[in-house]
Image: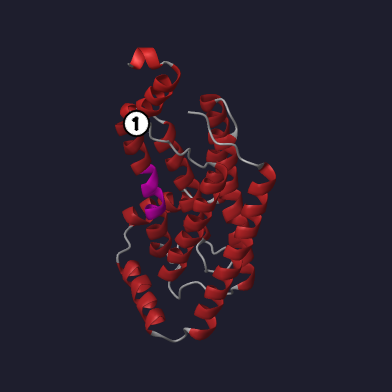
Amino acid sequence: MPSPHVSIGRSVTILVGSGLLLAIALSLVGWAIVNLATPSAMTVWEDGVNEWFVVQRTPALDTLSQFASSLANSRTCIAVLVVMVVALRVWLGRWRESVALFAAIVGELLIFVAVTAVVARPRPDVLQLDVAPPTSSFPSGHMGAAVAFYGCIAVIMVRQLRPRWFAVTISTFIFLVPVLVGVSRIYRGMHHPVDVIFGAVCGGVWLALVLTTLLPTMTVLRAKPQREIAKPVQAFDAKHNPRECG
């Protein structure tokens, strides 16, 4: 089935405009959390969750969480992006999916940077297992990148891989990456739970925008029943060939 036509100018306008609106919305939410929700039941709950994860730490879990967290760091995402862009181009013989994947990770990164420049939420007050980057704790950039980037890969696999059961199996494992990343970021003391939640919201909304704009699906029109098509044909024959119908 041929892919629907996508206007480059229209797509850029939609993505840029939507990205700005998403960044503004998340900035307002983050500002409210920092300035209006302290102290509150939410912050008490968040502190309890972060402290609970600290108690659960073991050397084995520290190693596993470090690996899970690294799946969404900048180096890993760049390396996977380069491989996938080339692989998708060779496999599918077009650039559309590669461009969508590039837009998914780059757009999410720009939105994340814009929001953290406005919102200055401190990291959790627990022992952190990673070196904290200069960006704000809200939202989780790792979580946003994992949802947008790996979610885009998973959707492409579902649409393009065959047989169907294989596509679903592969995509399910890919969809688990954001879950592992989110849990690992809280476990390692790098983010509050709400930071991870809104990181997922950021990545998920942006992914939806990229998919609907750059990878829209074709609408399959159902064929009319043969008897409905036959009626006008029979009427035409009766009008122009009366002998045959008499």
Q: Quadrant of residue 35?
A: bottom right
Which residue is depicted at the point 40% across and 37% down? 158
Q: Position of residue 149 (x, y in %)?
A: 50, 47
Q: Residue furthest right?
A: 9
Which residue is depicted at the point 53% across and 33% down? 3
Q: Which colouring convention does the figure follow?
A: secondary structure
**Magenta stretch: includes residue 243:** no
User: How dense is the environment of label 1, judged by Cα within 10 Å: few (below 14), some, or many (20 and up)?
Assistant: few
Q: Position of residue 83 (x, y in %)?
A: 55, 34
Instruction: Check disc 1 and report its element: helix, strand or loop.
Output: helix
Q: Position of residue 210 (x, y in %)?
A: 55, 49
Amino acid type shown at disc 1: Glu
Of residues 73 and 3, the one drawn nearer to the viewer in this rendering: 3
Q: Compared to 38, does 195 lie above or below?
A: above
Q: In the rendered view of the protein, which quadrant contains the C terminus?
A: top left
Type of secondary structure dominating the magenta stretch: helix
Q: Compared to 215, does 130 lie above or below?
A: below
Asked whether residue 130 appears in the rendered view, the answer is no
Of residues 23 and 222, the one drawn nearer to the viewer in this rendering: 222
User: Would you name the residue on which mark 1 appears?
Assistant: 228
Q: Which residues are magenta?
A: 173-180
Asked whether residue 224 appears in the rendered view, the answer is yes
Q: Position of residue 176 (x, y in %)?
A: 36, 48
**How many numbered tags mark residues here?**
1
